[in-house]
Amino acid sequence: MAGADRHPNIERMVATRASAGRGRPGPADVAVAGGGVIGLAAAWLLARAGHRVTVVDPEPGRGAAWVAAGMLAPASEAHFGEEDLARLLVAGAARWPAFAAALEEASGQPVHYEASRTVVVAADRSDRAALDQLLAFRQAIGLESRRLAASECRRLVPALSPAISGGAEVVGDHQVDNRALVQALVAACRAQGVELVAQRVVRVELDRAGAVRALTTEGGEVVPAPMVVAAMGWRTPELAGVPPGCLPPVRPVKGHVLRLRAARPLLERTVRGLVGGRACYLVPRRDRSLVIGATVEELGPDLRVQAGAVHALLDDARTLVPGVDELELVECSVGLRPGSADNGPHVGWSEVPGLAVATGHFRNGVLLAPITAEAIVAMAAGAPVAPELAAFGAGPRAPETTPASP
Ligand SMILES: Cc1cc2nc3c(=O)[nH]c(=O)nc-3n(C[C@H](O)[C@H](O)[C@H](O)COP(=O)(O)OP(=O)(O)OC[C@H]3O[C@@H](n4cnc5c(N)ncnc54)[C@H](O)[C@@H]3O)c2cc1C
């Protein structure tokens, strides 16, 4: 809603905050429904900006971001027909170095932000042709990558199979340890005075004028606040108490991820690949673990780990990096991405005064957490959000493309 930033709820909040300053007693300025990577990042930056913030989530930090791979990959996630999204991903990635440094300082915990370049490879000649087309598209929209012969790929990543047919080095694709990240966000929120309520939100309470007044939890607790951020990932549309159609129609998109452990490091940098047309990635961590992912499955809210998906991921990963065979398989997990109609996020004001939305980040919620959190802080101050995010807005949108990977 274009004019919602001028609603009396937000004006009152801005005025109260300016006169009272941080650390004052009393109810929250902002209640955040959902403490995933998006809700926690928003809560931390809001508290740092002087707001009193309450996050309501039965398990903060344990949503899709706990399962994710932590790639910050604006180039590898740019797909045909998604130029607006590609611009947003680039803007989101630019926030990361400062965000990671500030978070480490605030939490006293490392998040292992790594700016090492990603290598993208093709398993065979037809994968190479598909990859070349994608690289040409990415270059045309200004995303830098350097094409490599198979031998050059292997010089950069000695563990690659001799059978790969070539690839590219991608300059702007980096990574963070997603689990360390959400743990650091919880610690930074606590250090900044954010209240964490371990309950499930059921509804938003509105006042007589139809503006946000409070959140109600499953346990019957009422969290009063003039601004609510709906950040429950794929469950955001379940938030009750608001008029029909005011929350965007995000859906759960299932993804399997595997975690393996090595006695000594197998890879020094992230490898992404196409194997028989299927996307696969291998992300090395500092602790010598290796994250392999990920499937993209339209199966609704299905959290079962399925043998076929695990088999396919391992098969593709060992096709690219045969040394995977020697590793210990320590975890197979499933996460549910908040998918939108056009793969772009929904961030902004809803039609309900005081109700902000931050969801639909699909495959890039970790990458987009800092720019989204920054936008929520701007909204709480009655200011505009970054133009790359404003291009998407908060409301429902029609689909534009079908995703293809890597
Ligand atoms: C397999 C996989 C791999 C991925 N890899 C990457 C990657 O490499 N890079 C990247 O940028 N992104 C990646 N993603 C995407 C990223 O994880 C998501 O986009 C991101 O986690 C979305 O953040 P979120 O906070 O909106 O949702 P979530 O992280 O899902 O968090 C939602 C939170 O809301 C809470 N919640 C739900 N219902 C309620 C309720 N009723 N009341 C209170 N709280 C509630 C949940 O407990 C949860 O904590 C991946 C995702 C998956 C599944």
Image: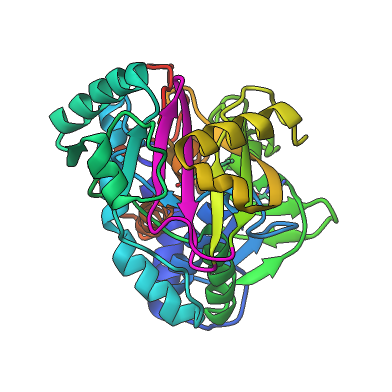
- Is 374 displayed left or right of 149 in the figure? right
Task: Examine the rendered structure and indicate whether residue 203 appears above or below residue 149.
Answer: below
Q: Residue at x 32, y 48 (%)?
A: 118
- Is 381 displayed left or right of 151 in the figure? right
Task: Examine the rendered structure and indicate whether residue 193 appears above or below residue 87.
Answer: below
* Place of residue 157 in the rendered image (x, y in percent of width and height, measured from the top left): 34, 50
Determine which quarter of the picture holds residue 401: top left
- Is 238 displayed left or right of 163 in the figure? right
Q: Quadrant location of the C terminus?
A: top left
Q: Residue at x 23, y 29 (%)?
A: 135
Confirm whether the magenta stretch covers residue 275: yes
Confirm whether the magenta stretch covers residue 327: no
Q: Please state which of residues 328 and 7 is positioned toward the viewer in this rendering.
A: 328
Determine which quarter of the picture holds residue 254: top right
* Place of residue 383 in the rendered image (x, y in percent of width and height, measured from the top left): 30, 54
- The image's colour scheme reads rainbow
* Place of residue 207 in the rendered image (x, y in percent of width and height, measured from the top left): 63, 47
> Is residue 252 visible to us here?
no
What's the magenta region?
A: 263-287
Task: Examine the rendered structure and indicate whether residue 262 appears above or below residue 87.
Answer: below
